[in-house]
Image: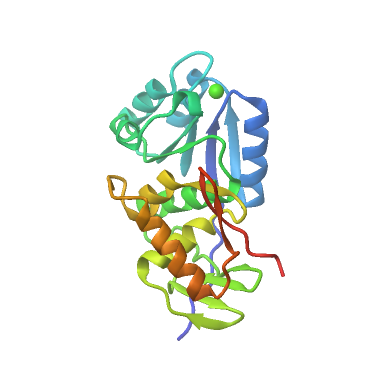
């Protein structure tokens, strides 16, 4: 079958963040992911830019020097459908329901890994944008492990490993930022459901099954009292 020539779309992102060091690392990460970033550090500038220029997505810090990020979000949302991801510090932690209520499409709690942020940006863009706006994601290789998110297939040293859909989702989530620790609650809400009130034993059971199927007990590492991380060696 003939493939459509791949069109490289540069996503244009508006970053609203008053902390220079956070802004610098986010800009760095997004530029590395072939995105173009416009950066402002106040709510006023954010609203005027968001409503006068075209962006594929807005990353919005909640704690801004001149106004509350929630009000920026509401004001922009009244006139624009540009997707918004809230960046919230732990001290101003919000829940997803509240974020959705003031018009955001998703939120991330600082500190976050750049790979996770890029993955979320792409996910929100896919969800909200035209069907073929984002190029297909390639297979992710982490040492002997390969994860193909399009076909939901996992390979260890090239050998196909059968995973249940939830096992796949769990592995793919931990692989968003290999080496980063994911909290149990985040794992539950991301992999299972935002409104999932089940027992954390489900996570442990799936981790145990994954370890067995991947044939290595050490790749998914438990971090006591926090959660799990994917620690596959690089080679
Ligand atoms: Ca801030």
x then y, percent, for residue 128: 36, 49
Quadrant of ligand 1: it is top right
Q: Nearer the viewer, residue 108 or 155?
A: 155
Q: How many marks?
A: 0
Q: Is residue 1 above or below residue 211?
A: below
The structure residue drawn at horizontal position 48% and vertical position 63%, both measured from the top left corner, is 171
- Quadrant including the C terminus: bottom right
Q: Is residue 23 rendered to the left or right of residue 227?
A: right
Q: Is residue 110 above or below residue 212?
A: above
The structure residue drawn at horizontal position 56% and vertical position 41%, both measured from the top left corner, is 112
The structure residue drawn at horizontal position 59% and vertical position 35%, both measured from the top left corner, is 38
Q: Specify whether residue 169 is in view.
A: no
Q: Is residue 49 rendered to the left or right of residue 101?
A: right
x then y, percent, for residue 181: 56, 48
x then y, percent, for residue 97: 30, 35
The structure residue drawn at horizontal position 57% and vertical position 72%, both measured from the top left corner, is 146
Q: Residue furthest bottom?
A: 1
- Quadrant including the N terminus: bottom left
Q: Nearer the viewer, residue 214 or 156?
A: 214
Q: Residue furthest top?
A: 66
Q: Nearer the viewer, residue 206 or 131?
A: 206
x then y, percent, for residue 68: 43, 18
């Amino acid at each position: 079958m003939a493939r459509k020539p791949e069109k490289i779309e540069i996503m244009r992102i508006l970053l609203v963040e008053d902390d220079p060091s956070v802004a610098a690392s986010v800009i760095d990460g997004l530029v590395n992911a072939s995105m173009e970033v416009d950066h402002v550090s106040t709510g006023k500038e954010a609203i005027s830019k968001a409503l006068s220029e075209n962006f594929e997505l807005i990353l919005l810090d909640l704690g801004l020097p001149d106004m509350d990020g929630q009000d920026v979000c509401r004001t922009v949302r009244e006139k624009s459908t540009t997707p918004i991801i809230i960046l919230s510090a732990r001290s101003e932690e919000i829940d997803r329901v509240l974020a959705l209520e003031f018009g955001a499409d998703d939120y991330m709690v600082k500190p976050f890994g750049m790979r996770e942020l890029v993955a979320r940006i792409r996910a929100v863009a896919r969800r909200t944008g035209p069907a073929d706006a984002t190029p297909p994601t390639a297979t992710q290789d982490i040492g002997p492990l390969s994860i193909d998110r399009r076909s939901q297939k996992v390979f260890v040293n090239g050998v196909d490993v059968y995973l249940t859909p939830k096992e796949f989702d769990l592995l793919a989530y931990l692989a968003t930022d290999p080496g980063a620790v994911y909290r149990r609650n985040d794992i539950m809400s991301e992999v299972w459901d935002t409104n999932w009130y089940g027992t954390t034993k489900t996570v442990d059971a799936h981790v145990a099954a994954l370890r067995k199927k991947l044939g290595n007990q050490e790749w998914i590492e438990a971090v006591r009292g926090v959660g799990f991380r994917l620690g596959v060696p690089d080679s």
